[in-house]
Amino acid sequence: HSIVPYWMLITSAAVAALFSLVCCCCIWKSCCSKKKEKEKNTLKLKEPKKPKMFKNKVQPDLEDIDPGFIEDIYKENTLGRLQFSLDYNLKTSQFTVGILQATDLAAMDIGGMSDPYVRVYLLPHKKKKFETSVHRKTLNPIFEEKFTFTVPFEELVERVLVMVVYDFDRFSRHDIIGELRIPLSSVDLSHSVEEWRDLQKTEKDDVSK
């Protein structure tokens, strides 16, 4: 039998040990990689991505809105306001209505203005009607006019005061800008009243040119 040289035995043992070491490294690396992938997937399940928020684009903070912008929207969606006064003299049975002024009236003309005037009467009997003078090309007229109805107090509290703001038109039907209807039973006539109210849409146009 031939004898294997000693150096060959040592070389073979070294190669075998190196091969075993390489295999162990590969197995360890593979295990670590799988463990990291598992931890990553677990983290994704625990912490899902939050959706992007567009709060500032969809619903901006109120502080960021220009006050002028809000005022413009208000004006576009209102008919205007009317200031009036009410006074009743129990001794003479005289009920005095003051049409003082209006502000921010809706523009009815092409030029962005109106020619406003106010008609005043009592319901249900509206035979007696008063009208202010017409103010040309303005949305903020100052009337300062007063009208007097002679009505006993017991009848007055059953009446409804109507104040209708019109836009005067020389060649066609006058447009109604808005109106106020005030049941006098809801008003304390024991003293003079002066206030502002928002104009409302009228249900029926009862005036022609």
Image (cartoon, rainbow, N blue to C red):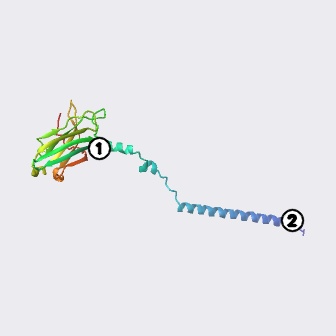
Q: Residue at x 17, y 47 (%)?
A: 87
The x, y position of residue 132, in whole percent, is 19, 37
Which mark is first along the chain, 1 or 2?
2
Quarter where residue 130 is shown: top left
Alpha-carbon neighbours of circle 2 within 10 Å: few (<14), some, or many (≥20)?
few
Q: Name the residue nearer the viewer: 10 or 151.
A: 151
Question: Residue extending furthest top?
Answer: 171
Asked if residue 59 shows in the view, the reply is: no
Q: Residue at x 18, y 41 (%)?
A: 146
Does residue 46 sit above or below 138 in this rendering? below
Q: Residue at x 66, y 63 (%)?
A: 32
Name the kind of residue labelled 1 in the image: Thr
The residues tagged by marks 2 and 1 sit, at their Cα atoms, a distance apart of: 106 Å
**Closer to the eye: label 2 or 1:** 1
Q: Which mark is residue 8?
A: 2
> In the drawing, does residue 82 fall left or right of residue 23?
left
Quarter where residue 41 is shown: bottom right
Name the kind of residue labelled 2 in the image: Met
Quadrant for the C terminus, please.
top left
Q: Which mark is residue 78?
A: 1
Quadrant for the N terminus, please.
bottom right
The x, y position of residue 187, in whole percent, is 18, 52
The x, y position of residue 100, in whole percent, is 23, 42
Q: Which mark is residue 100?
A: none
Q: Name the residue nearer the viewer: 146 or 59.
A: 146
